Image (cartoon, helix red, strand yellow):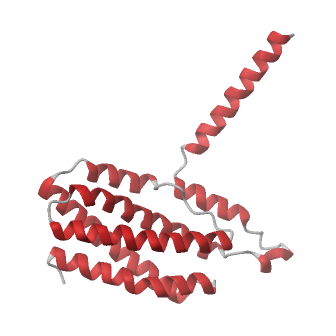
Amino acid sequence: MKKLIGIICVGCLGVFGACNNSSSNQDSVDSAQDMNDSMLPDSNSSAMNSAPASEEDAKWAVDVANSGMTEIELSKVAQTKASDPRLKDFADMMVTDHTAAADKLKQLAAAKSITLPDKLSDASQKKLDDLNKKTGKDFDKAYTNDMLDGHKDAVDAFDKGSKNLQDADLKNFASTTLPTIQMHQDSIKAIAGKK
């Protein structure tokens, strides 16, 4: 009997482990978004007015959190691997400013019951892995291009957020953070020699 119970327990653990592995393979951004979607009441629910954040606002927060984490992680690598001193200084600024913004967003998200990703999305992790393989001038060029692309997208996201978000606190966060992101964009364009 003890042997049978042991076999059943091992079988249960195997099933639980398989379920656990399949969910851990899900992209962190998708996972956070799924969690947020499950927290929203359906449109027929009378609790709709008490929803902590709209689906669009939660999606914006998840996307912005992932972008911020990506820029922080790429910049941490650039702090040590960049050969251009201006890029190292830029990377320092990025880590400082984006960490401060991420902390504010985490506080807002917690207050609004929004789940943020706890690690980079698969695409962002691939970008980080690819950057880590580069050295010297190739690294500087790749990091610069990543920052140019990332800040173009970030300025667009924060600009739209400052106009379209429904939640007043998130909208204010987007509005007050946008000038810093625009300044980052101007800085990386200057380093790249672009206008």
Residue 193 spot, x, y in % from top left? 14, 78
Q: Would you say 150 lies left or right of 33 here?
A: left
Quadrant of image for the N terminus: top right
Q: Would you say 166 lies left or right of 65 here?
A: right
* Residue 45 in view here: yes
The residue under the point 47% across, 74% down is: 101
Quadrant of image for the C terminus: bottom left
The residue under the point 61% across, 84% down is: 169
Frontmost residue, 5 versus 93: 93
Using the image, determine if residue 126 lies above or below residue 38: above
Residue 46 spot, x, y in % from top left? 86, 76
Residue 149 spot, x, y in % from top left? 30, 70
Task: Report the number of discs.
Answer: 0
The residue under the point 18% across, 80% down is: 190
Which of the 4 image quadrants contains residue 189?
bottom left
The residue under the point 33% across, 55% down is: 127
Frontmost residue, 23 versus 168: 168
Using the image, determine if residue 132 lies above or below residue 1: below
Q: Would you say 7 lies left or right of 146 here?
A: right
Residue 32 spot, x, y in % from top left? 59, 59
Which of the 4 image quadrants contains residue 83?
bottom left
Using the image, determine if residue 55 lies above or below residue 80: below
* Residue 60 in view here: no
